[in-house]
Amino acid sequence: MPSITLHRQLAEIPAASWDSLHDGNNPFVSHAFLSGLEEFGCLRAAWGWQPLHAALWDGEHLLAAAPGYIKSNSHGEFVFDHAWAHAFAQHGLEYFPKWLIGVPYSPVSGPRLMSTSSQHRRELLELMRATLPRLNLSSLHVNFLPEPELADFDSNWLARCDVQFHWQRRSHWENFDDFLADLSHKKRKNIRSERARVTANGYRFRVLHGDEASDSDLADMHALYCKTFAEHGNHPALSLDFLQHLAHTMPRSLVLALAGRDSRCEAGALFLRGGSTLYGRYWGAQCESPGLHFEACYYQGIEYCLREGLSRFEPGAQGEHKIARGFLPSFTHSRHFVARTDFAAALQPWCSDERESVRRYFASALRHSPYRDATDSALA
């Protein structure tokens, strides 16, 4: 009979066994990425992250697994539940600690209940849920689920959704001009103007994979990343050692777009590549310059996808300004089990109202499509 084990370090599970449970198209759930976060100081209990991965075994054969973390706050999750924590506190109850199944700091949809069998995914879910009282946890959350896993959750789970903005390649796009040709005249003109300003200000870009980036390139990107976080009053969780680890263990998945001027690296964006998708993650610049952010984070990524034959570009969470640059709304999904049935019942209508609001927002955003062939029937 299958049994569950819990692991405070991903290194306790063999990399080959873990990676056999997913198709390799999502770099964020790879053993190298997740174990690297732990090994190179990106996760700390003081920041609210304590690994607790779940694994379902049949003897020594790994049937299913989930990347998990005990959370003492909601930082770095991107599915916001501050109102839930406040409601618990108002009733003299503790919302934290809770159990999160997801990828730290990464609002990217991908495998969460990793298995080739729906039955094993459901067994893992049930065993994790049954473990909550023993661990004294208020709730279990599964964030940024892929659509195929949604059917594994029953009505005891609260359903939430949100919207991100993604770029989808069309079959006739061979280069950036082809992409621009499908935009409205105004949007096409604005993008060309933004790109021209970046060039006029002397910036030149190099796009490098991990195995093409020097130690200096990685250090420059990390320094730019740290600068951005410092400017927003946040702590930069990813270490330079972690970036070097990615460049070594996932050399063709790590992608850097570095902007130089007068032989100095002055701006850059960090991406991860998996399967047919490019994922935008972090960016930074030494100084503000018109259009530089859009060039580094969006246009360089689109050009990379067109050049490399990728079909999808997910540049990160939030940001309605992405619509005008060719990114259209896409749903994200999460599921939540709250152990107290009275709170779960109270949250059901809240989640229903939220989902309806998100659906209205999705439809509204889609009506602002920048593409020339956007029609009412297509939007419907």
Image (tube, rainbow, N blue to C red):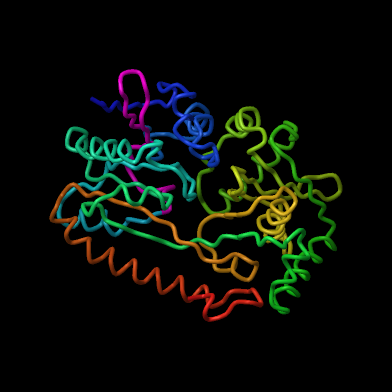
273 left or right of 122 in image? right
Q: Is residue 226 visible?
A: no
- Is 108 placed left or right of 214 in the picture? left
Q: What residue span does the magenta drawing correspond to?
A: 53-78
- Residue lying farthest to the top in this orientation: 60
Image position, residue 151 (x, y; %): 33, 51
Residue 242 on the magenta span: no
Q: Quadrant of the N terminus?
A: top left
Q: Nearer the viewer, residue 257 or 21?
A: 21
Q: Is residue 174 above or below residue 9?
A: below
Residue located farthest toward the left when viewing the structure as drawn: 342
Query: Which corner quadrant of the image does residue 223 belong to?
Result: top right
At x 23% / y 66%, what residue is drawn? 349
Secondary structure character of the magenta stretch overall? strand
Q: Quick check: 117 above or below 77? A: above
| Residue situated in front as seen by the camera: 294 or 201 | 294
Residue 173 in view here? yes
Does the segment drawn in magenta span residue 75? Answer: yes
**In the image, what residue occupies the spot 56% across and 66% down?**
328
Question: Is residue 279 found left or right of 77 in the rendered image?
Answer: right
Can you tell which quarter of the image residue 3 is in? top left
Q: Position of residue 65 (x, y in %)?
A: 37, 33
Q: Residue at x 50, y 48 (%)?
A: 234
**In the rendered view, does 261 fall on the left or right side of 299?**
right
Number of numbered discs overlaid on the protein picture:
0
Percent from the top left, x then y, of residue 95?
24, 48
